[in-house]
Amino acid sequence: MLADLSLQPLVDRLSGLGPEALYGLIFVASFAEGVLPPVPGDVAAAFLAFLSARAGGQWLPTTLAVTLGSVGGNSVVWWLGRRYGAHWLAHQMARFKLTSSEDSAERTERRIEEAYREYGWVALFLSRFIPGFRAMAPAAAGALRVPLWETMAILFVSAFAWYSAIVWIAFKVGSDWPSVKAALSRFAQGAGLGAFVLIVLLGGFAWWLYRRRRTRGQ
């Protein structure tokens, strides 16, 4: 987590960078978050986008830098899931303390697999907006042999939607980091809740269709 009290020296150090250098830094940070879930990707992306705005950067290049970095990192996780299986990856993440527990990571992976078999790309798209599911989604897609191009296309669209809002907040909400961070927290909570509600509604609709077809078949 980026501690507010220790940010000023970092702000002073990075303020001398131009927009292009910050775009590169944003890409690298987002790539790392795509591979290593504990890296505070959203907070780091918002903070670097905040610095990009201060340095005269633009919204679209900043959003593309963070999106492409995130999807690039996700492609590595997809390959690991395809090569070794999502269960192996969940075990390794728990072994190196990258998740709270192996059991919770494997439960998340199973839920994503079940949701993907039921709803297809919609489940993969929505997983991007739910904390915890985001880390395992590319690995589960790889283990399920979902084509790389399809997985990356879905994750690109969802990541672009997510980060475009985060970067917009960093560019538009307030002139100081605490204001941006508070707005980011409210946005993340609302987006996660909205995605969860949508998944529940889709599950209820699927159950209703199943019951209706079963009734007609009797």
Image (cartoon, rainbow, N blue to C red):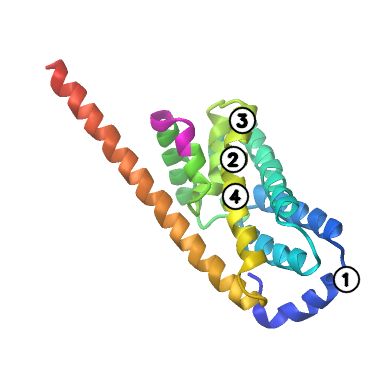
Gap in angstroms between the C-alphas marked 4 and 1:
36 Å
Which residue matches tag 3?
A: 82
> Which sits earlier in the primary sequence, circle 3 or circle 2?
3
Label 1 neighbour load within 10 Å: few <14, some 14-19, many 20+: few
Label 4 neighbour load within 10 Å: few <14, some 14-19, many 20+: some
Q: Residue at x 54, y 48 (%)?
A: 134
Single out the mark in the foreground, 4 or 3: 3
Looking at the picture, which amino acid does disc 2 mark?
Val
Q: Residue at x 24, y 27 (%)?
A: 210
Q: Please give the range of residues in magenta.
A: 117-123
Quarter of the picture holding the N terminus: bottom right
Quarter of the picture holding the C terminus: top left
Gap in angstroms between the C-alphas marked 1 and 3:
42 Å
Q: Is residue 36 left or right of residue 8?
A: left
Gap in angstroms between the C-alphas marked 4 and 3:
16 Å
Q: Is residue 55 above or below residue 120?
A: below
Which residue matches tag 4?
A: 93
Q: Where residue 118 is drawn, which disc sits there?
A: none
Is 93 included in the stretch rendered in magenta? no
Rendering coords of residue 5 (x, y %): 68, 83
Q: Is residue 215 above or below residue 87?
A: above
